[in-house]
């Protein structure tokens, strides 16, 4: 790809805008170095990845990549045996943590909305949970080694704190003494050269003995380590050296563990950078209202209301354009400042964006092509140093394009043939277009020469186009009209501006008859176009009215169906109650007949059974609902199913099966045995895999079998976190807890702000604060309950 085109079409401004949407420096670097590809399959994969990220971002919000740094320099140092500092180790753990969060984030969507490319990327990230836990057990996000990193370090630091406390107590007792206070410049204890000292006036230097470590700029104050605490400071210094050695040992051990995983961590870093870059493309597409283009490599472009991405949406005029099917060359004519150059740049820039895996600002159904190269000769590139005229500059550029172009190239030329004699310039422009057109490349060119209008009209595969101009307002509309050559409109403009009619008529007489025929033809084409456009608008309005009427009819039909279903259900319920009443009366009559038979009437039992069966068949069948209209086979009723008991017209749940023909049904607080043929299945029991399906759930509760007083929300979005906090506070109140800990991490602070805003409004929260030292610091909010 000719890199000169990036500057000509301002492609670098697109990559700079894209980089702003990256969450990490790694993704920003990839965005700034983005280049178009001429490989169709590679472009399709890149666009598919962007489309998948667009789906995930829409469903789950932004990717959880905050806090990720470029750890590649630290990994290279670990590879050669250098000891990493605590902050570098923390950044490594932050990247491994981001990899696990991205895995949950993508897989949570993949189950219901397949995103195979992203799923493959996150699955390739190595599992470094053990290394991450080891690092975070030893260091914090401020770059400090924690006391809990080792037993030895905890012991040494405890001795340090005790030693510092004793020294301070000793010095504070000295400075509080009335006899000593007058000798001090200030009653305070400070540190010089890692040793505790007190500020003594110059004239009392000999009173304290000890060691002078510093003095003020005026010399009036000496910072003296009194002789009474010299030995204590020496002991403290030795303990600090022990602490430094233990810290170095811990960092060395952690660095060795990192060194064992350097290759995997480098791969993970590149993968996370790629994921951030892909999601940056998705967010850029969302913000610019762009769509996924269909791609081809047969030189076909179809833009539906394509917009120049660097012009604000509220002022840009969309462009409709088709190239590469019936015609491969478009010649655009029209007045200056009419938008010809913008249309030219729009085609080229959107092509570069699509070939870079970016969505394009256009309507759905737009198609773009993968070219082997895009060339452009746009603007006045006159060089004073090379003593080139405007014409020479353009011609030099065109000669370079002719040497490099192929049949699979896109060529954009602005003001073709300009800067020289009109007759020679137009002839040269026609010759250049003919040569390029025969080669088979795709061409969009702008010109002022009327000779090119006739050339495009007569040549197969070449079509005229123009920028629309409103003669009534004397303003361009910036709309590109395909198939209609541009008019000069010079006479119409002159007349509206007040030029005398006699002069205008004289000027018209100087125009050749052929030119007048061309202008008349163009005017006729434009009138036909306007008439066709009006008819199209009218047809579009009729279509919209028909669609609205159809929607209204559909709504009325649905309302009618719903009312009919309700009435049918009421009729069936009434019929069922009538039959139930008749059945009871028949049972009573049959019982009476049986008694008579026992007395001698010899009435046979099978005849009574047949009579009861006829009564049962007289009951209307239960309405089976919309699903059963599809003649699905009924499902066998089982435990946990929600059912309706026909005879009682009540809903309940099946507790267990009682043989082959009966089931135990829970109806409110009652349990009773019911025949299976008296039951209707409403909804099946939820499958046991429910919890498995929810494994992508993002909020994890820090609780065992007994309720604990902390809730871990790290890595989650604000909406789901607030729902979990509300539930957590309710359970905490039921457990009679007075204080709870909500872990939200440091991150960008969005989650912490959302949680604290919710706590501020919660009726059961008395107060809240950030965690103190040992409680998690700013990564934890401690809430006191009422």
Image (cartoon, rainbow, N blue to C red):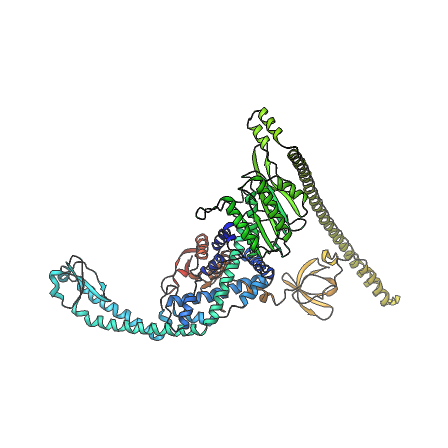
- Relative image position of residue 104 (x, y in whole percent): 53, 64
- Relative image position of residue 14 (x, y in whole percent): 50, 52
Q: Identify which residue, 407 or 496, lies in the foreground.
A: 407
Q: Residue 597 vs residue 191: left or right? A: right
Q: Residue 670 vs residue 1: left or right? A: right
Quarter of the image where one finds residue 88: bottom left
- Relative image position of residue 153 (x, y in whole percent): 33, 73
Q: Identify which residue, 717 or 81, lies in the foreground.
A: 81
Number of marks in picture: 0
Quarter occupied by the N terminus: bottom right
Compared to 529, does 669 lie above or below?
below
Quarter of the image where one finds residue 140: bottom left
Quarter of the image where one finds residue 663: bottom right
Residue that protrudes farthest toward the right in the picture = 601
Compared to 368, does 448 lie above or below?
above
Q: Is residue 702 visible?
A: no
Q: Identify which residue, 287 or 751, lies in the foreground.
A: 287
Quarter occupied by the C terminus: bottom left
């Amino acid at each position: 790809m000719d890199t000169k085109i990036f500057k000509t079409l301002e492609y670098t401004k697109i990559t700079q805008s894209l980089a702003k949407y990256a969450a990490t420096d790694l993704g920003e670097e990839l965005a700034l170095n983005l280049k178009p590809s001429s490989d169709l399959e590679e472009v399709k994969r890149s666009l598919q990845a962007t489309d998948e990220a667009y789906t995930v971002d829409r469903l789950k919000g932004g990717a959880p990549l905050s806090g990720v740094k470029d750890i590649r320099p630290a990994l290279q140092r670990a590879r050669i045996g250098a000891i990493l500092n605590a902050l570098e180790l923390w950044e490594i753990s932050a990247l491994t943590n981001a990899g696990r969060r991205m895995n949950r984030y993508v897989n949570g969507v993949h189950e219901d909305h397949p995103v195979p490319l992203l799923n493959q990327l996150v699955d390739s990230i190595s599992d470094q949970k053990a290394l991450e836990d080891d690092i975070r057990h030893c260091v914090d996000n401020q770059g400090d080694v924690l006391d809990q990193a080792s037993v030895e370090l905890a012991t040494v630091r405890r001795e340090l704190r005790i030693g510092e406390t004793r020294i301070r107590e000793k010095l504070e007792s000295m400075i509080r003494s009335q006899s000593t206070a007058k000798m001090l410049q200030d009653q305070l204890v400070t540190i010089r050269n890692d040793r505790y000292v007190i500020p003594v006036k110059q004239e009392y230097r000999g009173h304290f003995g000890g060691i002078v470590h510093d003095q003020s700029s005026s010399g009036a104050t000496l910072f003296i380590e009194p002789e009474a605490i010299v030995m204590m400071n020496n002991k403290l210094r030795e303990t600090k050296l022990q602490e430094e050695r233990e810290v170095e040992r811990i960092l060395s051990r952690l660095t060795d563990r990192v060194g064992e995983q350097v290759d995997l961590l480098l791969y993970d870093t590149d993968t996370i950078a790629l994921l951030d870059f892909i999601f940056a493309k998705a967010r850029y597409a969302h913000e610019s209202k762009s769509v996924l283009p269909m791609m081809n490599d047969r030189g076909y472009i179809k833009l539906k209301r394509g917009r120049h991405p660097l012009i604000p949406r509220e002022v840009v005029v969309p462009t409709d354009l088709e190239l590469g099917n019936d015609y491969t060359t478009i010649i655009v004519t029209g007045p200056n400042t009419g938008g010809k150059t913008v249309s030219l740049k729009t085609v080229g820039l959107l092509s570069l964006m699509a070939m870079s895996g970016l969505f394009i600002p256009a309507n759905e159904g737009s198609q773009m092509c993968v070219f082997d190269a895009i060339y452009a000769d746009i603007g006045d590139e006159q060089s004073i140093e090379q003593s080139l005229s405007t014409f020479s500059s353009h011609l030099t550029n065109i000669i370079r394009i002719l040497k490099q172009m192929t049949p699979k190239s896109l060529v954009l030329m602005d003001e073709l043939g300009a800067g020289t004699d009109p007759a020679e310039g137009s002839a040269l422009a026609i010759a250049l277009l003919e040569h390029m057109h025969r080669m088979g490349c795709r061409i969009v060119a702008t010109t002022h020469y009327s000779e090119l209008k006739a050339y495009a009209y007569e040549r197969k595969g070449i079509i005229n186009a123009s920028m629309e101009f409103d003669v009534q307002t004397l303003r361009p509309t910036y709309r590109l009209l395909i198939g209609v050559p541009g008019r000069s409109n010079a006479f119409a403009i002159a007349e509206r501006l007040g030029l005398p009619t006699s002069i205008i008529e004289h000027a018209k007489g100087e125009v050749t008859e052929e030119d007048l025929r061309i202008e008349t033809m163009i005017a006729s084409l434009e009138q036909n176009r306007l008439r066709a456009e009006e008819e199209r608008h009218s047809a579009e309005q009729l279509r919209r009215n028909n669609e609205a009427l159809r929607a209204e009819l559909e709504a009325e039909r649905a309302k009618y169906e719903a009312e009919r279903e309700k009435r049918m259900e009421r009729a069936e319920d009434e019929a069922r109650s009538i039959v139930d009443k008749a059945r009871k009366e028949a049972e009573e009559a049959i019982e009476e007949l049986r008694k008579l038979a026992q007395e001698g009437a010899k009435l046979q039992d099978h005849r009574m059974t047949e009579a009861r069966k006829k009564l049962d068949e007289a009951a209307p069948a239960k309405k089976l609902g919309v699903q059963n209209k599809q003649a699905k086979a009924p499902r066998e009723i089982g435990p946990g199913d929600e059912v309706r008991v026909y005879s009682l017209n009540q809903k309940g749940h099946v507790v267990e099966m009682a043989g082959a023909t009966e089931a135990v049904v829970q109806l409110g607080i009652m349990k009773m045995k019911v025949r299976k043929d008296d039951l209707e299945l409403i909804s099946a029991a939820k499958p046991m895999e429910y919890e498995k399906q929810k494994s992508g759930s993002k909020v994890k509760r820090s609780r065992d079998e007994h309720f604990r007083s902390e809730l871990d929300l790290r890595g989650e979005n604000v909406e789901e976190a607030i729902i979990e906090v509300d539930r957590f506070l309710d359970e905490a109140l039921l457990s009679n807890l007075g204080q709870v800990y909500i872990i939200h991490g440091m991150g960008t602070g969005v989650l912490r702000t959302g949680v604290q805003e919710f706590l501020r409004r919660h009726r059961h929260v008395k107060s809240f604060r950030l965690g103190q030292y040992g409680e998690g610091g700013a990564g934890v909010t401690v809430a006191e309950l009422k």
